[in-house]
Image (cartoon, rainbow, N blue to C red):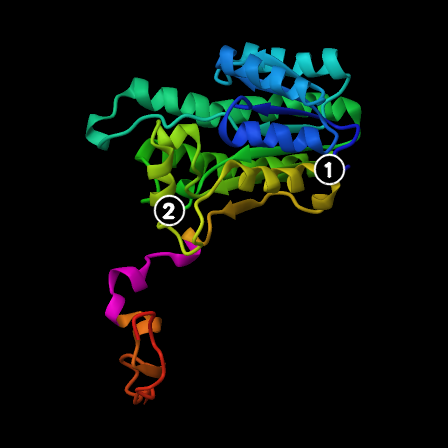
Amino acid sequence: MRLAEKVAVVTGGASGMGLETVRKFAAEGAKVVIADFNEQTGAEAAADGTAKGFDVSFIKTDVAREHDIEAMCAHALSTYGRLDVLFNNAGVGGAIGPITETTVEDWDYTFDVLAKGVFLGIKHATKIMRRQGTGGSIINTASVAGLSGDAGPLVYSAAKAAVINLSKSAAVELALDRIRVNAICPGYIATPLTHTGDLEGIQRAFAKSQPWPDFGRGEHIAGVALFLASDDSQFVTGEAIVVDGGLTAEGPARSRRFPKNAPRNSRYSGVTKGSTGVTNDLRKLDATEPTSDAD
């Protein structure tokens, strides 16, 4: 098993991507602490894991409170004797709406959970991992919203951008301790955070939002988290790994916005040379050659 004898903590581990990761880690042999603000779902997740034969436990955690993060790490030590992996995954949608209508309180709440929570997790996990002297892996949930200006709400996007840079900076600082720090940047993942009751509707919408024909699921993130937690990624640190079904690769989605000019619909092949003064080198495609699904 890829995580045999390792101890992992997963914040936001009672639902969505976090819960899928808890299950994946536990199935690969890890002892897992489920840290979550929701006491009911946290207890249920722990009970379900125990019933499946996994070695899991739960502690209620507000990641924005340093005392709670300290208690979370202390719980891992007192229950399992060490800490090898921390997945700073807890998140909220946070502030929404125009910047002119965003209150300082909403900004602070969003950054407290999404950015300060990651900072506190890195801070206190590092203290333990350094004492152990065997290195470790810290994984942070960022987002494709932190990579551009129009993939999520403004404050959420700013906080996720902070997580990406914090991950890179911490990776440099902690490299000599053999503590790896990486971020995962999910695209549109159908979780309780996103579907708010209309799971089928959000699945259909998300499946159409990127080149890959299937919608994103929590297990897709859990698989990458497993890679980053395991020794398979022992030379990977300071990375922001995008898991989005090709969403960011597609960029401005020119083929969707201007379908007549899309490569699949084009009647020409070759190269255009803009304002260089050099003639474009184009050839007209055979009229019998299929150029789109409709042809």
Q: Position of residue 245 (x, y in %)?
A: 46, 51
Residue sitting nearer the eye, 238 or 10 = 10
What amino acid is at disc 2?
Ser
Q: How many marks?
A: 2
**Distance of label 1 from label 2 (alpha carbons):** 31 Å
> Which image quarter holds the N terminus?
top right
Identify the residue shown where x is 43% and y is 53%: 213
What amino acid is at disc 1?
Leu
Q: Position of residue 17 (x, y in %)?
A: 52, 32
Q: Position of residue 66 (x, y in %)?
A: 54, 14
- Report which residue position mark 1 lands on: 176
Q: Quadrant of residue 131?
A: top right
Residue sitting nearer the eye, 93 or 245 = 245
Residue sitting nearer the eye, 53 or 58 = 53
Q: Residue furthest left?
A: 100
Q: Which residues are magenta?
A: 248-260
- Report which residue position mark 2 lands on: 148
Magenta stretch, main secondary structure, is helix
